[in-house]
Image (cartoon, rainbow, N blue to C red):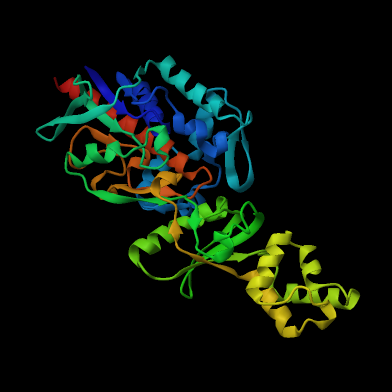
Amino acid sequence: MTDVVVIGGGPAGLLAAIAAREAGASVLLIEKGNRLGRKLAISGGGRCNVTNAKPLPDLMQNILGNSKFLYSSLHRFGNEDIIRFFESLGVKLKEEDRGRMFPVSDDARTVVQAVVRHAERVGVQVRLQTPVAHILTQDGRLTGVETERGETIAASACVIATGGASVPQTGSTGDGYRFAASVGHTIVPPYPTAVPITSDHPWIRERRLQGLSLYDIELSIFRGDKRLTAEPGDLVFTHFGLSGPAALRASHYVTVSLRDKPGAPLTASIDVRPHWTMEDWMALFKSARERHPRRRLRTELEGHLPDRLAAFVLHQARVDGEVPLAQVSHESLTRVSRALKRLSIPVTGTLPLEKATVTGGGVSVKEIDPKTMGSKLCAGLYFAGEVMDVHAHTGGYNITIAFSTGHTAGTEAARYALARLAEV
């Protein structure tokens, strides 16, 4: 018998277990894999972006899925608390671009080891390689869990922190949805977000742009003439479409549009230099024409862009780059300048959910108390992290949600379990 059982040894589960133990409950953390913190170990490109330092209003703006639901938890245990938590463990952090917080070591193992050691130090009991088959209830109350080996573990409270269905190699294979559904919870169909975008443009299919990286661009997604989002950042062309931070941030709008308006045409539009206007580009070309009239237009473009990008811009503008600047018409320069501001690529969709960094959808938050992360359908059952229908942009926001909701769920699960113990 344990007071609180936590299912899942990722960031949300670890914080839930630690918070529950620090609140005075006995805690058993169950992980079906062979080690804890597997998703932490690969986050942030293996450097572990532990949170984002932006103020709460900015954090909320970067949460795409049910941000209002998370307000109470983030206010209770937010990014500043996360930073203090890691500093108390001796993990020195540094702030990088757009508020992202990383360990000074630039090594995710620093974070994983610190959290796991702290969990052990405060007395969290851990069971590895122990898949859970069912959660057990009686008369609308949680009574424990049953493992796939047929073992029953009695508990007063349970925190489901199994993650979503993205990055399945870390153990996030949707188990939590099954557990939640077994007691009547609604599961919003999972979908990929923070995932590369696909395209059938001939230059993509022919791999003419594969491996080309662009920096500090702005990527917009259009449905017809309506702009759905504009995301600044870096971009990478792949053999199937677009990847990199800007594409991952924009992918949410692709998946939601395909879900809500299937068949509506989508286009990715790249602004190669967002801080320049069309007039700035026109002025540059006209100045170059006066100074170097015999220089080819392609050569001039290649002085400002990677060669392959320059070729793509000329292709899209339908302008011959071999023509000397002195012979390039005003209309042609206008088309090139327009292409530099809106380099369009048709979008067919995204890679599948198992290739996504983050899962959209999950346990409906309408059936979860936002102040406690407790189930409204089953007393003693709590949720934390990506298993719920919450998600955010990349950049430390999703892990902030995991840590915050984990801390809230663990604390409240402990309070509930100890109150139940007092009743006996």
Q: Answer above or below: position of 49 versus 227.
A: above
x and y percent of residue 199 in the render?
Answer: 50, 61
* Observer able to see residue 125: yes
Taking the spot 66% from the left edge, 77% from the top edge, the residue there is 318
Name the spot of residue 174 as percent of width and height, x first. 31, 40
Q: Residue at x 65, y 54 (%)?
A: 212
Identify the residue shown where x is 44% and y is 45%: 355
Using the rendered image of the protein, determine whether residue 416 is visible from the camera's viewpoint.
Answer: no
Residue at image point 53% right, 45% down: 395
Which image quarter is the C terminus in?
top left
Quarter of the image with the N terminus in it: top left
Up/down of 143 relative to 197, above or below: above
| Residue 273 placement: quadrant | bottom right
Quadrant of the rendered structure where residue 35 is?
top left
Please state if 365 lies on the left or on the right of 55 as rendered.
Answer: left
Task: Find the residue positioned furthest to the front.
Answer: 206
**Quarter location, residue 315:** bottom right
Q: Which of 250 and 11 is in front in this view?
A: 250
In the rendered image, the vertical position of residue 109 relative to residue 306, given as above or below: above
| Residue 292 shown left or right of residue 59 in the figure | right
